[in-house]
Structures are given as C-alpha cells and as structure tokens.
Image: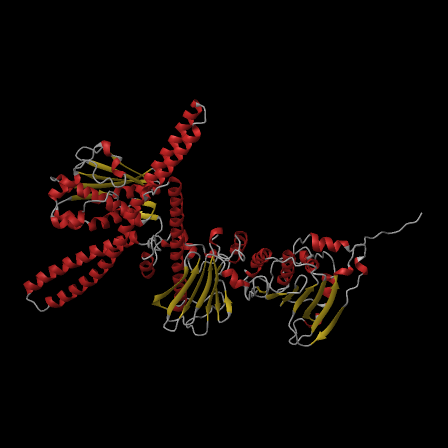
Amino acid sequence: MKEEYFTFTVDSALLNELGEKLVETVHLALLELVKNAYDADAKEVTIRFKPTPSCGPEIHVIDTGLGMTFEQVKSYWMRIATTNKVANDRSPMYGRPRAGSKGIGRFACRRLGSKLELVTVAVHNTDHGKRNPKFEKTEVTFDWKKFTPGAEVTTIKCPGQMEIIDEEKTGTTLIISGAEQDEWSRRGYAYLKRQLALLVANRGARRRGYEEDPGFNIILEAPGLEGDIKDLREQLISAGWGTLTARIESDHHAVCELEALGIGKKTITSKQAFPHLTGVSLNIGVMPISKGQIRKTDVLSLGTMKEILPNWGGVQVRYRGFRVYPYGEGDDDWLNIDRDRGRRKGTVDDELSTFAAKLRGVDPQRALLSMLSMKNYIGNVEIGTDAQGFDLKPNREGFIQSDAVRELKDFVRFAIDWSTIYRDYYIRKKARGDSEAAQEYLEEIIGKEIEQDKVVEAATSYLEKQFKDVANLLPAAQRRELQKKVDRATDAILKHDESNREELQHLRLIASTSTLLLVFSHEVKSLLGTLEDENVSLMHLAKKLSTNDAKIVEEIRVELRETKERLSDLLKMTSLIGTDSRNLKPGQLALAEKLAKAVKCYQLIIKSYDISLDFDEVPNNVVTKSILEAELYAIILNLLSNSIKSVIAAGGEKRIKVTAKREGGKTIVKFLDSGLGLDESHFEDVFAPFVVDPTGKLYGNLEKHLNPEDKYIVGTGSGLGLSIVKEIVLARDGAIGFRKPPKGWKAELEVVLP
C-alpha cells in the first residue's frame, strides 16, 4: 500500500474568477484599487486615463501612501486572498477603518487590462523612526496573459527587482495597460465618482493611538470622459443643494456668496464688522438629505450622502493650515445650530430680518425653522496669519474664549443663516411653482381658467364628473353605494380646504402682528431713552426753581419714572413674545409675579375707569410648570384685556377678580368679572378664530363708554385672542373654558395649566 500526503494546487483560472467574476465592471475594479491606496494611508490619489488608439485606456493609479517593502510585496501582494487586512482592521499610520478587506483588490487590475506594472516605495525595514532613512523601491511586472487556465499559479514567474535608494517619497504606482476593449462609459464614470466621494469625504480626523489623519483626496484626469477633476473633494462640496463661500475683506465686513439650486448665484455684504477676522474665509456645502436637492448627481447620490454626512458632516476649523479640534468633529455643535433647531428658533437677527422680509413668501419670524442639522453642512473655515486674537488652549482642544472667537461664530452663523433664508425661499418658491403647474394642468383638462381660491373646488368637481361617467357602467345598487362614499370624500376635502384657508388667514394676521410688534419695540426703546433724558433735564431745572415750583417738577419726574417703569416692563413682555430668545425654556413660573407685571400694563386704563382688580387669592407659592414665560404672559394679557373691555362696556360697578390654586398636579386659574356676561350658547363659539363679538353687544356698548383717547389701548379686537390662548393651553396639555359664574359675577373663565 502506498501512502502519500496530498496538497492543493491553484489553477490560473482562479484569477479569472477573482479578477473578472467577483469584480464585475471596470468601475468596481478601479474603486478597489483606490480603496487599497486609502488603506495605505495615502493623502492623495491621482487616477490618470491615457487613451489608446484601438482599445481601452491605459490607467495610472498613483498614491502617496506608505508603500510596500520588498518583503510586504512577497508576503501580502503576491499572496491570494490574504487575511492581513482582517487581522489588522486599521491602517498603520492614521488608524483609518479599512475600506478593503477581501484581499482581491490587486486582481481587479486583471479586470482593467492584461498587463500591470507595480512600482512601490517604502521606508527600509530597518530604518523606521530614523532621521534620514533609506527607502526600498520595488518594481514588479505582471503579464496576466501568462495566467491561462490549466497553468499552475505558483509556477508562473513575474519579473521584479528591488533597490535601496536615499531620497524618495513613499507611495505606490500602478500602470495598467492592454485592455482588450473600452468598457468605460459616462454612466459608469459617474457611478465611480459617487463611490469615490465616500472616500474623499474624509477631510481629516484624529484617532486615539495614531497620527492625525490629514484627510484623503482624489484627482481624476480623464480626457474623453468628463474632463479632469483636480479636487474631487471640492466637487463633493458643490454637489449638494448649495455652495456657500464667504470672506472677511480688508474693511472687516463679510462678503458671502451662495450658488444654489433654484437660486443661482447670490451675494451679500454684512453691515456688521468683524475687526479680528481679517482674511478669514469659509467654504461650505449645504446638503439636505433630499434626492431633489442634489445639483451634481454624477458626484453625489442620496445613498452616498446618507453614508457621508453621519461620519463626515460638520464645519471644521483650520488655523494657519492646521486642523483645530474638536470643531466639526463627531457631534460637536460649536455653532449652536442643533441647539437652535431643538428650540425651534425661527427668528433671524435684525440685519438678516430686513433681508428676509424682502423675499416673497419668507417670514422673518420663521425663516430659520428650515435650518438643517450641523451634520448637513460639510466644509471648512480657514483662519490665516492676518487674523488676530486667536489663542489655542494649552491642550490644543479648541481656542481660548475671546472676542475673536465670538466674532468667528457670529461670522459663520451669519453666512449659514443667510443661506438658510434663501433655502426657505427656494422651498416656498418650488412649492408655488408645483402648485401653479398643477393648476395649469387642471385648467388645461377642464378647458377654462380657475380662480386661485377655487382650485380644490374645481378639482373635486372634475373628479365627481369623471366618477359619474365611469359609475354609469355599474349596477344601480353598487353605483348608489359608491356615490355616497365619493360624496363624503369630496365633502371632507372641501371642508378641510376651507379650514386650511381660514387657518392661513389666521397665520397671516399673526405674522403681521409680529412685524408690528418689532416696530413697536424699537419705538419704545427710543422713547425710554428720551424719557431718561427729559428726567435728567427736569432734575437740573428743579435746582434753579423756587421750592414750590421745584416740588411740582419733582412730581412730574415721579410720574415720568413710573411711566418709564411701565414701558420697560411692557417692553420685556413684548420681547419675550416677539422674539425667539435663547432663554425661552418651558419651566416653573410664579403666577402672582407674572400677573402683577401684566396688570401694570393696564394700570392707566384701570385707574381711568375706576376698575377694581383683585388678585389677592393668587398665592405667591402657586406656580405653573412646563410653559414658556411668553406663553403665560400671552394668556394673562389676553384674558385681562377681555375682562377690562367687558366691565367698561357694561358700565356700573367694574370688578375683576383672579384666583388660583394647585390641585391634582395642575394650576387652576379663574378670571371673574362683572361685565356683560356670556350666554352658555356661546361658551365654545368665542374660541373660534375671527369670532369677535358673537352677541353683538360688546363693542357697541364699549364705544359708548370709552373715552376717545383710550380707543388704541382697548381696541376693537381681531377675534384671535381667545383662539391663540386656547391653542397655547391645549399645546401645554391644559384646558380652558367658560363656566356658569357664581352669584355676584357675570362671567367666569377657567384655565387649567401644567
């Protein structure tokens, strides 16, 4: 009996399976080679296509990575399906997660051409860490035509050589030639760019235990396809909805430029000066995750964007050529973008508010609600040597806080907020365009023009007519049943449309009120300054007058001070309601304190009409929870105003009482008055928008009893007050409603708050 050990042999046909079957297209083959360069810690790869007369192009892949030593070429490159990358899942220098892991990337070269020339340079094995190391330059030639089916892989020789050189840069060059046919197409080239975008999204990172990763870039030289791309990273940044650039000029003002989908190219120069930021610039891609908002689909797809942004999104800072951490790293929100999104900040600052108001359909009070997450902005801020006032922390983790750092944040937010306003404008413009296109199509099939507010009605009428034409083919019973369903559906659509139009009118009125509020606040600020100046003038005047005259002047000064205090309190309230202050957080509020401040706003009218306003039954320890201060003031001011109007309109004894208590984890507030009262049949009606005076008694009687000079204080009402109050209360999980009043009172309104 003959015994013998058996060993496997490898037929060259395997390379065909690896290089041509697993890597199905030339685009995937080239991608595998670029992944190898990424894993070799290259900072940059150049892909060069050289056209040939009768077949596919000669391809050069040149990287600046660590290269391979002679031994590494023998052990790893020449070993089929090596597990080296599985065992070492991070690149050696920068700690990059390996992009390739199957060990078949080198055989992708076979898919690209019949011949491969490998030239690789690495630090000599014994010279790592030395000041003047030696380098190994290894060259190997592969003729894939020799690897024919039936031939033993291990018997086919690939000529090569190695030499020790003194001065050289590390890296690997692959020269692939002999493609039998040209398989490159524009469509495939675009796919390649989209996949490469995942790699160039690496703009730099720092990983524990490794050197700082400077990022990865790709240069494409492809005559005959789509021309050269000197910087694929720049292509990536400009592929989303918009590209935002800005620079601080020598006069210290910011010049911003936005080139965006549906907007074109826009510029703005800030009125605000940034004296510390001379020469500072930024380049940011604005990338909403929306297929319809991608400008360069040959560079970016929705799928690649979803992979890129979570890992590489964010605005980085570079100071004198070096990356500054942690800005733009991970979840860092150094611009407070995600914080403002979480708070639903909508209002822009005064300068941008004026700009936003000029754009059709943009509400300055809500323009930032469409702001994207910090991760949806990808780019850099560059701080050069001309900028002043920047000092790194001792641990080099960010800058020491200074005026320069604050200016930097203001500058970048100014640019981003400006681009957000334009994106809000774009969204609204596109929605209008889509709506107009739909209306034009409907007019075309109906054969007549349709008024703007009759589009839904016309569409439902058309659908009903079409249904009847089809339904006539059905049996009578089935037709009647379907007709009922269609009637109910179209009725629901029409009622919903009517409700939406009423709500839109409601919102327009609120928006116009907000604008007036801003104007009012500005004028009150000016008035407060005037009052203070006049008060000082009166003080100097009193010193020159007799005792009696000085006493009269002092009484006037006291009245001016009281007036100024009332206006100051009112200004604080309007600023809460009219702006999106950073301090507006739902929280615990003392009801008695807020009620007292609200009453001051009506002090003149209360005094003029001898109104008794009692809130002694509002204990100091009664609080509201989980409600904004602005919301609480809106509730109190509206309800006090209604009670004041009612008691003046009724005449006679004018009494208002407010009570409050905590019960069952809620704050129960009651407003009672001796006014006109309200019939139970209208208890719900008064909360509907635009219902001003359901009984027709209030404003007629009010006009009879009201002094002409007080008309602007009390007003005629918009029908929005109780509607707004109810929306606030319900949104905070509360309740509101009129109740049958106790003896001695005409009206009682109960509010239940958290």
Answer whether residue 244 is visible to the viewer in this image. Answer: yes
Residue 194 image offset from top left, x and y in percent: 56, 57
Q: Which residue lies furthest to the front in this view?
A: 447
Q: Nearer the viewer, residue 44 or 166?
A: 44
Q: Which residue lies furthest to the right in this view?
A: 1
The number of numbered discs placed on residues in the rendered structure image is 0
Q: In this view, does 541 lie above or below 657?
A: below
Residue at the spot 81% in from the left edge and 57% down from the top edge: 152
Residue at the spot 11% in from the left edge and 42% down from the top edge: 704
Residue 373 image offset from top left, x and y in percent: 45, 54
Q: Nearer the viewer, residue 505 or 188?
A: 188
Answer whether residue 74 is visible to the viewer in this image. Answer: no
Q: Quadrant of residue 663?
A: top left
Q: Which colour scheme is used?
A: secondary structure
Whether residue 544 sits left or right of residue 312 in the image: it is left
Residue 591 image offset from top left, x and y in percent: 28, 46
Q: Residue furthest top?
A: 477
Q: Is residue 69 above or below residue 446?
A: below
Residue at the spot 75% in from the left edge and 54% down from the top edge: 14
Q: In which quarter of the image is residue 413?
A: bottom left
Q: Nearer the viewer, residue 350 or 285?
A: 285
Residue at the spot 35% in from the left edge and 36% down from the top edge: 494
Q: Nearer the viewer, residue 506 or 613?
A: 506
Quadrant showing the C terminus: top left
Residue 230 image offset from top left, x and y in percent: 55, 67
Q: In this view, does 697 lie above or below 338?
A: above
